[in-house]
Image: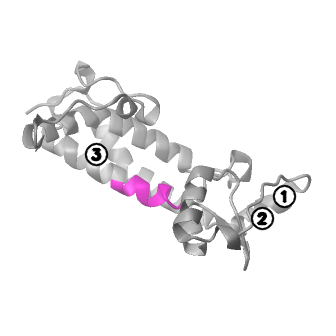
Amino acid sequence: MRKECGWLGFGPLSANVLAHPLPDLTELDVTIRRLDVADSLVVMRGRTIRSETAMRELTRSCWSLDDIDAGYRAFVQSFRPLIKALSGKSKRSQLSKKQAFIVRTLLIQEYRKILLRDPWLPAELLPANWHGAAAYQLCRNLYRRVYAGADAYLDDRIETADGPLPPPGPSFLQRFGGLVPSTDTEYAVHE
């Protein structure tokens, strides 16, 4: 259960107590039912009354925030040169559909490696100069730049048993705070 809760972003307060500031209760319930441990666990909700400084220290001991922040910082350092290169107006700043697909795949793979370890703590519990927000913005902006070309690449190469891939659903276009539909020429790529 400790391992499974760790995947859900819980951190150890002690040997038998795990905590999360904003847990996804639906996911927790699914995990508890799947592991058949409902009768063995006590799930509580609490709040801090005093001592925000002590809570910040406790937070640092429960989650590897320095490691997570270092991951976000490395992500930004890795992908920032690419978004800068793609921000130009020249033909060299455009990607082929295949390149857009590769960038999107690597982008999301690298971002999720960090994101899945991030407990999504409130800002007041995070270290100063937290790189998570910068990593999110960079990932969002680069994703917005390449997703249409990446989708076009998949449309050219993959189909369902019934024929062409269906268009993305509404939830897809809500990613990263909203994507511009792929007909927008700002996101066009060259062949």
The disc at residue 104 is 3
Residue 44 shown left or right of residue 117 in the figure: right
Tell me the SS state at disc 1: helix
Looking at numbered disc 3 in the image, what kind of residue is underneath it?
Answer: Arg
* Residue on which the image places disc 1: 53
Part of the protein shown in magenta = 109-117
Looking at numbered disc 2 in the image, what kind of residue is underneath it?
Answer: Glu
The outermost residue toward the right is 50
* Residue on which the image places disc 2: 57
Label 3 to label 2: alpha-carbon separation: 36 Å
Tell me the SS state at disc 3: helix
Tell me the SS state at disc 2: helix
Image quarter (top left, top right, bottom left or bottom right) of the C terminus: top left
Residue 169 shown left or right of residue 46 in the figure: left
Judge whether residue 8 is colored magenta.
no
Q: Are marks 1 and 2 in contact (CB under 8 Å)?
A: yes
Q: Quadrant of residue 78?
A: bottom left
Q: Which residue is drawn at 84% across and 62% down?
A: 54
Assess disc 1: are there few (<14), some (14-19) or many (≥20) residues with their C-alpha within 10 Å of its C-alpha: few
Residue 188 shown left or right of residue 180 in the figure: left
Label 1 to label 3: alpha-carbon separation: 40 Å
Q: Measured from the top left, where is residue 32 in percent x and y?
A: 59, 64
Marked residue nearer the N-terminal end (3 or 2): 2
Marked residue nearer the N-terminal end (1 or 3): 1
Label 1 to label 2: alpha-carbon separation: 6 Å
Assess disc 3: are there few (<14), some (14-19) or many (≥20) residues with their C-alpha within 10 Å of its C-alpha: many
Q: Quadrant of residue 4?
A: bottom right
Residue 49 shown left or right of residue 21 in the figure: right
Image quarter (top left, top right, bottom left or bottom right) of the N terminus: bottom right
Judge whether residue 112 is colored magenta.
yes
